[in-house]
Amino acid sequence: MTAIIEADGLQRTFGDVRAVDGIGFAVEEGSICGLLGRNGAGKSTLMNLVMGQDFPTAGTVRVMGEDPVENARVLTRTCFIKESQSYPDAYRAKHVLATAPHFFPHYDRALAERLVADFDLPVNRMVKKMSRGQRSALGAIVGIASRAELTLLDEPYAGLDAVARHVFYDRLLEDYARHPRTILLSTHLIDEVADLLDHVLVVHRGRLEIDAATEELRSAAATLVGRSADIAAFVAGREVLGREWIAGIASVTVAGLSEEDRARAAQSGLEVTPVSLQQLIVRRTGAPAPEEVAS
Amino acid sequence: MTAVPAASAALIPAGRRVWNVARLQFANPWPTVITPWLVLFGVHALTWSIWAIIAHYAGPSLEADAFRYAGGVSWLVIYMMVIAIQAMNATFRFALGFASTRRDYYLGTLAFFGIMAVVYGAGLAVLAGIERATDGWGLDGSFYAPAYLYNQPLAVVGFHFFALYLLFIAAGTLVGAMFVRWRATGLYAFFAGLLLLGVLLVWWLVGSGASAAAAFFTESPIAVIMAWTLPASAVLAALGFLVMRRTPVRG
């Protein structure tokens, strides 16, 4: 495996707020990696640090083996599209699209034109007059058409409707298959992107909560549905990530089920279903935080 | 995991990266290139009309240097300073979002405004030439080379505007960099610094410098005075870069 991004002990504080609080991870070259987490978890700050747009309080980040800050060797091989990207006031969408090829050496104009049609983007409209979804579409078009070796997409489809989001997923995957690259994608629409991702990084309150291959993560837990009494007998002594009851029926998400366990559960009349990535992450990051203990 | 081997060179050579940023500022030429000339010609037309009215009613009693002190050009330098500040605010985050380094961004922005200084310096010199060739637009007026420029060669007129532009643009890029880095706090700091400089200058003038300063400004040729603004502009531009190179991208 070859790491295109390596972070070690990365920290960024704003006053008292620890936006990124000691994060270390590696992103494999050629993978599609999801950076997941709730709003304010530190996803955008982390991406800003990776792209040298912000400066770490402590720790290091290396992109293509080098410090990304002020490093044209690294940056000319990257594309970073974010929800909050600002555009000059006087720009229309066509100005943005005309400018992009100068900055991204692998940019494909023909692809960009097709994407403009797919997203139905009004290219003559002033960017500042565009809706949030149209601005997102503009960013997504540049992000896909730039074909940068490393593409970072920070909440790239905020404001896009479900149809446009699926256009985005389809086109991204289609072009990725033809022109492989590394993609780091942040989002909180976890289930929508789950099938896209090779690897998942989950950030919670500035810390890295999960760093795992998607498959590994999915098989790490399962949901069991059955009669409450059977469920209670089966899960005794196991790590339960969540439970729900309706009348006499219980649904329990359990960590660490082996093949044997699954077979045994099925024999006891319990239904074993795969846990959704979203449920799993909600369970791991959604619980009320324990009281901070003063050190 | 092993690391991806480091790239040997940037995919876009340095000169083109800087030029790319300069081109960003041209993408919509209206505020920087077209509007100022339109406004300038508008002001010129108004000024000329007023001259014509005065000349008509004053008749032969009009003094020879009546139309020599128009201020219709000087607003341009302030306008360009404001444009420089606005441009930094508008394009910094955009350029960094398009994978520019701060260094390339700053150099490209300076290059753009440097070109603007040449264009405006040359343009105003040409207009001053037309002004002289047409006997001051037929009314012995001096709009493009007023006051102390009236007797100067056209090359000095052009250099004067070029250097003046550079000075205001360098100040504008410094203010712009401070605003982009520290927002309003940066502006307060800049104007507090400017105020302090002003107080120090007055203090020096009142003390011993008044006669020396007066001698410098009255005895030196315009070209020499303007040449002395070049190092000042360079210092302002360098300060701007120091501010810019550690500026995070916000928002």
Image: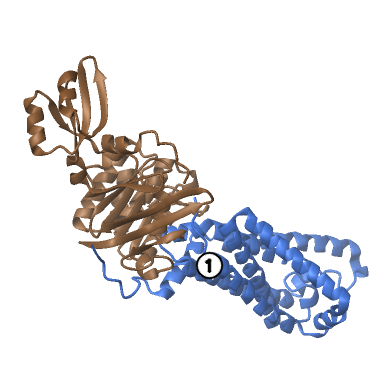
Chain colours: A brown, B blue
> Percent x, y for residue B81?
64, 63
B118 left or right of A270 in image:
right
Q: Secondary structure at mark 1?
A: helix
Quarter of the image for residue B52 reads: bottom right
Q: Amino acid at mark 1?
A: Thr
Closest to the observer: B190 or B162? B190
Q: Residue at x 83, y 75 (%)?
A: B204
Could one spot residue B72 in this view of the protein?
A: no
> Percent x, y for residue B111?
53, 72
A124 left or right of B138 in image:
left
Residue farthest to the front, as pictured: A295
Q: Residue at x 42, y 51 (%)?
A: A20
Above or below, comparing residue B167 to residue A243 in the picture: below
A293 left or right of B129 in image:
left
Residue identifier under label 1: B109
Closest to the observer: A17 or B20? A17
**Image quarter in which the N terminus of chain A is found:** bottom left
Q: Residues within 10 Å of mark 1 (few under 14, many from 20)?
A: many
A92 left or right of B10 in image:
right
Q: Chain of mark 1?
A: B
Above or below, comparing residue B232 to residue A60 in the picture: below
Could one spot residue A195 in this view of the protein?
A: yes
> Percent x, y for residue B166?
63, 72
